[in-house]
Each structure stands twice: as structure tokens, then as C-alpha cells.
Amino acid sequence: MAALEEGFTLSAVPLGAGPHGLLGVEQSDKADQFLVTDGGRTVILYKVSDQKPLGSWSVKQGQIITCPAVCNFQTGEYIVVHDNKVLRIWSNEDVNLDKVFKATLSAEIYRIHSIQGAEPLVLFKEGAVRGLEALLAEPQQKIETVISDEEVIKWTKIFMVFKHTVLIFITEKHGNYFAYIQKFNSHTLSKYTLLLGQEEKSVIQSFSASVDRNFISLMSLSSDGCVYETLVPIHPRDPEKDQRVVRSLLLKTVVSGDARNGVALTVLDQDHVAVLGPLLPSSKECVSIWNTKFQTLQASKELPQGTSGQLWYYGENLFVLHGKFLTVIPYKCEVSSLAGALGKLKHSQDPGTQTVPHFVNWETSRGHRFGSQNSEQSKRILRRRKPEVSVQNPASKQLLSAIKKDSEKHIEEELCKFLAIKPTPDFNTIIGDIVSELLGRHKAEPSFYPRNSLMQLIQTHVLSHSLCPGLMEAALEKADVQMLQLCLQQFPDIPESVTCACLKIFLSISDGSLQEAEINMESVSDYSDSVQEEKMEEQTEVLHNGFNAEEENCGNCDRELNKKPQDAAEETTSCPVIPKRAALLNAILHSAYSEMFLLPHLKDIPAQHVTLFLQYLYFLYLKCSENATMTLPGLHPPTLNQIMDWICLLLDANFTVVVMIPEAKRLLLSLYKFVKSQVCICSELNKIEVSFRELQKLNQEKNNRELYSIEVLELF
Amino acid sequence: MGEFKVHRVRFFNYIPSGIRCVAYNNQSNRLAVSRTDGTVEIYNLSANYFQEKFFPGHESRATEALCWAKGQRLFSAGLNGEIIEYDLQALNIKYAVDAFGGPIWSMAVSPHGSQLLVGCEDGSVKLFQITPDKIQFERNFDRQKSRILSLSWHPSGTHVAAGSIDYISVFDVKSGSAVHKMLVDRQYMGVSKRKCIIWGVAFLSDGTVISVDSAGKVQFWDSATGTLVKNHLIANADVQSIAVSDQEDSFVVGTAEGTVFHFQLVSVTSNSSEKQWVRTKPFQHHTHDVRAVAHSPTALISGGTDTHLVIRPLMEKVEVKNYDAALRKITFPHRRLISCSKKRQLLLFQFTHHLELWRLGSTVATGKNGDTLPLSRDADHLLHLKTKGPENIICSCISPCGSWIAYSTTSRFFLYRLNYEHDNISLQRVSKMPAFLRSALQILFSEDSAKLFVASNQGSLHVIRLLEGSFKHLHTFQPQSGTVESMCLLAVSPDGNWLASSGTSAGVHVYNIKHLKLHCTVPSYNFPVTALAIAPNTNNLVIAHSDQQVFEYSIPDKQYTEWSRTIQKQGCYQEAYRPCL
């Protein structure tokens, strides 16, 4: 999953004084060091990890740098051009740019390209390209004109393809764009006309490119805010002919369409692009990472002080001129998953239009995806599934419209009608829609709480918490324990925080209001009956063979406890909560959780509730250990493991609280004593198990290991 | 078929001897294995690893080295200082030559197979010329300080590497002088051990000498300069054996920890021509010392003190994934060591140097399939018969009536008469057994115990009539003209009319005992015969072969039976559920 980390400012010195911001940020021959060329007269070498400049060079007053400084990776020297025609080459040791090597050329330079493993290349404004060596050998050589009059180079980039350098540059003439590919192994120049497609009128604002084996994938950010991709072949079939390449839509509306300037695009890797510019018309400028495969926004970062509309990307860092300062934003892309990619899908829901279900029904959509994969480009866009899914059956449409305005009663009737229909493949999608619609209305007018309808919907077994996160929220708000119990039983994916919130309500709700609620008592059997019949036999100190149950440090507490055996017995053998509450708590015990996420929430439960819950758990534990199978009676009773886990969790989370409050003290002591006796029993069982195992072994040996036996064998 | 009372006998306390040497012969695909009791066994790897021949051991003959020479000749040398050549046809020792250098520790045949080199206790390396019918001493190499424990020829035959104690010598064969002496580090994990014994050396054609020693090292030496090139410490105990493949691209070493390591010559990087030796695979199929290893083109073979012979196919070399691609562990003897007296419920067990006679227990109870019945009488150990002399017992038999026991060693044949008086047994040896019966390979009594059949190693088959306390030589079936192949398996028909005998490769001969003449010969088959039996009533001869095929041959009709033809056509598995006999 791609992510942007906290950025930091690289320079304390304001940069970008000129009208066009920075000229460029280029890599130097050492990792982590970058050459920043200011629009005016300065070149600064920065070490990014140290956030400090290592060197700074300026040209004389009156001269102006016209092309970003680059590093010659072969020699380690730096090259810069000032006043369009003058080359300066210097190294780290040089202090004054006036005194370093100088070469005046016969034509104006557009850019110098330098790439690891090849000699620097000089691109002239007329489109000619020369190697630096050849140029320095004869600076005044004639430079030919490649591009036509009025054609202007807009953008250029260099690549290494199979150890050969390939240079691409884009020119513009009267709103038409041309791509030139210059290959240096074969010295061929191919020209392509970029066809803009339907969006004929848009102006390309930024280019970026990445290279694949045979294609340069040229991405362009147009003034309509969309990113287009053009595949330019590196090896053209017929280099002489003028060829055309078509661009296709890759991402729709990544920046607000009316942002006229300050937008930029750079390719990060195979599936990710970084875009600089405002996301929404009114919002501030920000840098955002888009996943082109899933068409999703992965991360974005606001840059409130404005940018120069330039974006560079080297290694793992994005360079942006934020305000007046060069800012470095580290970018990370970990292995992404589909779920992760979808998680950040923007829910930009236009008000007033027909609602779009934002639940993807994988069953139905999969077929669509595969079927239409190679057809038209627009199908690639997941977000634009409006025409596909909004085809709903009339019953649901009617229901949805009923939800908007009708009374609860009426909605119930409509719902019954709808549920009576045979479920369609997109049944769960529609159910999701209905629930969110209901909740939406509840939110708008709090008095509207269609409890019965919601209950009915939950019982369709297709809902989950992630499908309707607002449902439990609303139930919690209303302290609707019946609904909460139902949700706990039905939803497989309740977050721990919600589970804990439910627990809080279950513990705090008054007995009176509980009596009114209709609660499913399946998990609670009649504890009270059995309690009266048999009294727990009191655990007395027993001296087991070789094991003294009474250890020194616990001697006191035992004795203390023995003083009030009556109380203790009473306390532990009768259910501390009324059956309805017990049923609710059992629902909590049954729910799935992850310890790590649950623990912090458990800490928030008030002390007396913790004690109550512990008492209840202790009671269950005692009940469990009454029979040999260690189970509770009833239809869906909590298992011993669940009880034990919750005791541990509660004690872990509220350790200090439980130790401090006096009411809990006796409970803890009796719990401890009981656990100890159980451990005792277990250790005894262990011993017995070992002897039984030995017996079994002996038995088997006797059967097999005898030296001589006569056996009956029947052959057929 | 019916219900049987199966006696499960687990008191045959037979312990095979440990393996001392293995020698693989590439041409015949045979493996010679010598054991610590002096036994030498020949396994035919092509015939499903069947042990087709064996030479009985001798107490004084501890084999230390075993090798094949040109023309499928097998030599061994041992601590009695003798070099022995085996006669693979007659299954006896052809001759023994004393090398006069004290105990022999090592032996190597020259790459051309015409010269034999032995390393002796006194530090001498002796060169013998192999002549067509014997070996002849040629000369001594430069004498070394201590015993020569390992020898290896350079594939060109010009040089020899000899491992001794603490050093390796490289000899020039022509002059017999030591060219290099390579000292082996005594240090072992920083502790100076007393001595470093070079248990094995291998000379490669590029001049590299690989040595394995008692400090757990596998070392690579440059024989041209006499320097150590590479050192692999692979074990905390001795590395006792080494064998190199013919292509010299892989070798195998065995350690005293029971581990076998495979080394392979692999490219340093995926497409470079530079190669180096890399330890690739460890195998732990043994529990004790791996005293001997061999490298066949497709498998690693190892054997040691734990008596198992392990054949581990190299999966990358095996082309067809069939039976041969499976790991083989040969543990059980391939010979019949138990004979049975049906009438008296007796079992005779054959050990290396003694026989044991047991009476089976009995029961009066009955039960259903799978029941273990309570014993009314337990099994009894009746007799413990020790051999005289140092020779191992080759074969033994008890008569069906239980009154005769016969066994043979290389030099003598013994026949005993047993008398039963209530619970007492008396044993009476029949004296003056003829000399031609010695070194018998198989002994069999007729069903009525009146006749004794002895297969001798010369290919002849003797028939002896047994009388009360004495015997009479009736007849000798001479081998077919031209063959001297010894007979290993015998079967007699219950009615006493027919006797079938088989060697290792030729067909099965069926003799008519009444008329004392050859009745017929079952055509020979590609694989050796592993078992023979004649069915009662029908007199059908059932023959099992090492490739797990079973044939049924009707002796009266002199042809394969219909059933046999059917299963040969359809394969055994379809017929497996049909009653066979």
C-alpha cells in the first residue's frame, strides 16, 4: 500500500524566486545527494538524509542559468548551462563557477541529460542531440535543426533500455503534440504524432513517462484533470514514416479540472503515479498518490502554502517546492492488497442523483470485469459503475423511495413485500442499500427509528458490520439491547471497540429496562434451579501426596476466607445477574475478538461493572466445573475456554482497578482459591494420565513383543 | 483357502555381520560386499538388487579391501596378509597369495585393470601384475613410515596417492618413488589429536587428491604442488570412506556418525565455467559407522557397522521413475537360514558358527481370524550345535522327520542322526562323509527323509540314500557339459519323484529321481531364480524370480501351465485374488 510519510523541508533558504520556480532537481553521483538548480543563478547540492546543503555555486551577476545542473556520472563532475549557450563543468572542489571549465556552443541548449552508465547528452532547442564528449571536442560545431519552425520542446526524458540510452522529447505546435524518440545505439530518430482523442480541446499540462521493454509509457495530465497514457514504441516498424499514437484514459479527474496551473504528474512505479494539484476545485493544492491498476487514491497530502507546480521523484523521495522551501516527502509503497486498495476509495456522492450502492457484489461484478476487460478504456474505471449496478428491481426501488418519506409502519409493510420476493443475485447489495438508507434517515430525523424493519433485515443473515457500520452505532445510542444482541449473534466482523461498547451497555443497563426488552434466552439455561439443589462442596485444605495445597503466602488469605464460608458460598453459587442480562453477556462471550484490540477498550469499563462481570464469569466457571465434561447446560452456552479467556482479559485490562477496590477483593480471593484447587486437580490428573499411558504401553508391548505366539490366520 | 494356525517365531536371534567393504563393478552392474566375518556377497543391481552369490567367511580372514579387476575378477585383501581371488563361477576361493608385508590395509586396481597395488602394515606399497590365472609380485614402492590405509590411482595410471597416518604420499608408478608428501593437520577443532588417520584417498584426473581422515575433514590437495587447496570439516568423528563417480563430478563420503555426504562439482554461478566442489546432500540412513561407500552412475551405495546395505538412487540421474528410483535398504539375508521338520514341529536355525534346534509350542485352543491363542506348551530350545574350526556354516537342513541334521562348511560336510527318547535327545554324528560333499551350497532331504540331496559348488548334484545311522551314495548328476555353474536352489516333490535345481543364471533343471536322469530343463529367464517349490499332487514347479515374476511349470507335461501363461499375459495383479495352488 502506497503511503506518504511526513515531509521535511530541505533548505532554510527561500528558493524559486524566479517566475518558473525551480529549474530542476537532479541526482548526483552519490546516493542521497541531489543537485537543486534555482531559477536564478544558484546550484545547491543537498544531502537529503542530513537535510543540509553540502555545496552551493552561483554564476556571475547578469548571467542566468537556463538549464538544470546535472551530474556526469562517469566523471563525477557537474554540468550547468547559463545564458542558453555557455556550458560550465566543475567538480566538488571548485568554489567559483567563473573559474571553471567553460565552453560556448553554437546553438541554444534545451536540456542536458545525464543517466547512470552513459555519457551525458545535450538536447538543443532545435531538437538536435549530441554526446557531451563530442560536443566538447568541437564546441563550435554546426548543430542541425530537427524540428520545424514554431515547434517548441515541451518536455524531455532519458531512459536506459537494454544498456542503450533512449531519449524522448515532446514538442508542441499549434496545440498539436509530437513525440520524438532518439535511440543512440542505432542513431535513429522516430517521430510520432500524439492524437488526443475525444478531448481535443484540452491542453496537456504535465508529462511523465516510464519505460517497459518495448514501449515508453507516456503519461500526460491534461487540463481536464485526467491522466492519459500513451504507449510509444521504442522500436518503430518504419522509422521514416510519420506515425501516430493514440492516448487512452488512465485515471479520471485526479485534479480539479479548472486548476489552470500548478499541476504536475510523475510516475512512481508500475502501478502508482503521483499527482500535484488540487483534488477538488476549492481545495488546497496537494500531492496525491494514485493506483492506476485499481484506480484508487492511495494517499494524499495537502500543501497549503502553494507549490510551483513542479514535482520530482528520485529513489524514495518526492521533491516539491512548497511555498518558498524545497520539501522532501518520503514515499513508500508496500505490497498492496485489493482490499487495501479499495479501502480508500473516495465516496464522492453527488447530492440529488440516484444513489449508487457502494457495496460491491463480487459475485456479479466479477463476470462484468472479465467480460469487458479488453473492450473500451472506460471499463477500467471501477468508480464509474453507475450504469451497471443501479439496475434494481422495482420492489426495492419502491421500498427505497418509501424509506425516504413514509412512516415506519408503511416501510415495514413494504419491506415484508420486498423480502417475500425470491432473492436476486444482488440481494445483499440491495439489503445493504436499504439499511444505509434507513440509517441515513434516522440520522437526519432522530425520532425515526425503524426498529422492526432493521431487526428483520438483520435476520436475513446477509448483513455484516462493515456493510452497515451505522447500525450498531444507532443501536448503541438508543441502548437497544435486543438489537445489539442480535447484531452480536449475526455479524461476523464487529470491531472490538463496538463489542466493548455493547458490553458497557449490557452491564450498565438497569434491571427494569431489561425486563421490558425481549431478549433471546437461548444461551441461558435455568441456572437458579440447579443452584438450590446442590450446594458447592467446600474446598478444604487437603494434603495431597507430596503436595501441600496451602502455600505459605496464601495461608492468610485462605484462613481469612474460611472465616466467612457462608458468605462466599452464597456469593459464588447464585447467579449475580438476572437471566436476561446473562443472555446478553453470553452474546459478548460468544463474539469473536482479537485480544490486542480488545484490551485497551476493556480498560474503560467502570470498576463496579468489572466486578459484576467478573462475578458472573466466576459463577459460570463454577457451573462449568460442576460436571465432568466442563460444559454448561443450555442450547448455546459459553464454552469453558471463552469464560477463561474473558476472565484473563478482564484481569489483564483492569488489574490495578480490581486490586484496589474492596468489593473485588473477596471475589478475587475466592477465584484464586478455586483456580488453585483446579490446578491441583489438573496436576493430579496429569499424574494419573502418565500412569495410564504407561499401562497402555505395557499392554501394547505385551501384545506385540512376545517372542513366540500362535495366531489364527484365515486366508481367502 | 482356510484357517491356519500361524506360529509367530521371533526367537531366531540372528545378527548379521557388519559391512566392511563395498566394490561396484560398472560393467556388470554388480556390487561386491564384504562383511566383518569374512563373507563376500555379490549383488546384481540389474536384477532388482538380488544377492546372487556369496562366499562363506572364515574367522581368520578379515577382509580390509575389495576390488574388481579386468575381466570381472574379484580380489580381496585382509589382515592375514593375503590377497585372495574369488572364483565367481565355482563360488570358491581360487587362490591366496601372501604379500609378505604384514596385514594388508588397502588395495587398488590400476585404471586399466591389469595391476594390483596393496598397502601393508609395514608401510610398503606392493605392485602386483595380474596375469590371466594368477597375480605376480612385481616390485615395492618406496617404503613409508607407517601403515598404508588407503590407495588411489590417478586415472592415467602414472601416479598413485597413498594415505597413511598423518600424511599422504604421492608415488610415481614408473619409478616407485614418493613424489610428494602432504602432511595432514592433526588439529581437530583446536584440540591436537594424537594422530590423524587418512581413511581414504581419491585421485582425480586433474591432479586433485581428495582425502578423508579421522579428524572429520574432507580435504582437497593439489598433487602437482603438494599443497592443500580446500578443507571441509564435515563431522565430529572420523570420515571413513570415499568413492568418486566415473565422471568425477560427484563423490560420496561416509562418516562414523552414520551420515553419508554427497559432494558435487557445481558451477560457481549459473552460467560460468568455473566449478567447485560443494557439499550438497547429507543422508542419514545408518545408525553406526559407514565403513564403505560406492558410487554407481545412478546411486550412492553405503554400508557399515549397522549391517545395512543402503542404495540411495540419485534422483537427478534416474530417468524412469520406477522401482529402481526408490531407496533400498538391504537388511535381511538373501539365503535360507531356517529349515523345518514338519512331522516333529522342529525348527533349525543357522547362525555363523552354530545351529540351534527349537521345538514349536502347541495350543489346544481354537479361535477366529486374528486371535492369539493361549499356549499350552511354549517353544523349547532343544539343541545348540557348534561347529568346529574357523569356517562359517554355508548351509544346513533338518529332515522332515526330524531325525537328521546336515550342514556344510567350506572344507567339511556334517551329518547327524537325532534320536528322541521322551524328552531327551541324543545326537550321533555320521562319520566318514565323502570329501566331494564339502563346500555344499544347498542341502535338502526328501519328503520321506530317506534321501539327501546335496548341491555342490562344482555344479554337480549328489543323491545319497540314508539308512538307519549310515548312508549310501546313490548317484551324482553332473552339470551340463561346459557349465560349471554351481546350483544354489533345490526343491523336491512331495511324492519323491522329482528334483528341481537352479543356478544363478541358467534355467531350472528337473531330474527324475526314480530313474536318476535329467527329465527336462525349464528355459532360462532374464532374472535369477529366487525360490523354487513343487506342488503336491499336480507336480507343478513354481519358480519365483527376482523381478517379482512367478511361473508355474508342469513337470509331467514339460510345459508352462495355463495359469502361468495367463498371468504372464495379464500381469500378476489381476490374478492375485484367485487361489493359486
Image: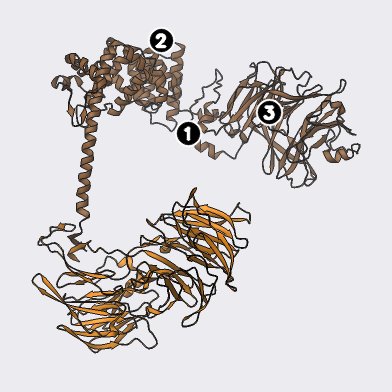
Chain colours: A brown, B orange
Q: Secondary structure at mark 2?
A: loop
Percent x, y for residue A162? 70, 45
> Which residue in the protein does label 3 denote?
A265
Q: Quadrant of residue B378?
A: bottom left
Q: Are marks 3 and 2 in contact (CB under 8 Å)?
A: no
Q: Is label 1 on the same chain as label 2?
A: yes
Query: On the rendered image, what quadrant is the C terminus of chain B found in?
Result: bottom left
Side (left or right) of B557 relative to B68: left
Q: Is label 1 on the same chain as label 3?
A: yes
Spatial separation of the CA atoms under disc 3 and disc 2: 49 Å
Spatial separation of the CA atoms under disc 1 and disc 3: 32 Å
Give the number of callouts: 3
Three-letter code for the amino acid on which mark 3 is drawn: Leu
- Classify B269 as above or below B579: above
Mark 1 and mark 3 lie on one chain; the one further toward the N terminus is 3
Can I make out residue A43 in this image? no
> Which residue in the protein does label 1 denote?
A362
Three-letter code for the amino acid on which mark 2 is drawn: Ser
User: Nearest the camera: A184 or B495?
Assistant: B495
Q: Secondary structure at mark 1?
A: helix
Spatial separation of the CA atoms under disc 1 and disc 2: 35 Å
Percent x, y for residue B555? 27, 82
Please give the chain letter of the residue carrying mark 2: A
> Which residue in the protein does label 2 denote?
A447
Q: Are marks 1 and 3 in contact (CB under 8 Å)?
A: no
Q: Secondary structure at mark 3?
A: strand
What label sits on residue A45 in the rendered view? none
Q: Are marks 1 and 2 in contact (CB under 8 Å)?
A: no
- Classify A55 as above or below A445: below
Percent x, y for residue A563? 18, 14
Percent x, y for residue B79? 41, 70
- Classify A146 as above or below B564: above
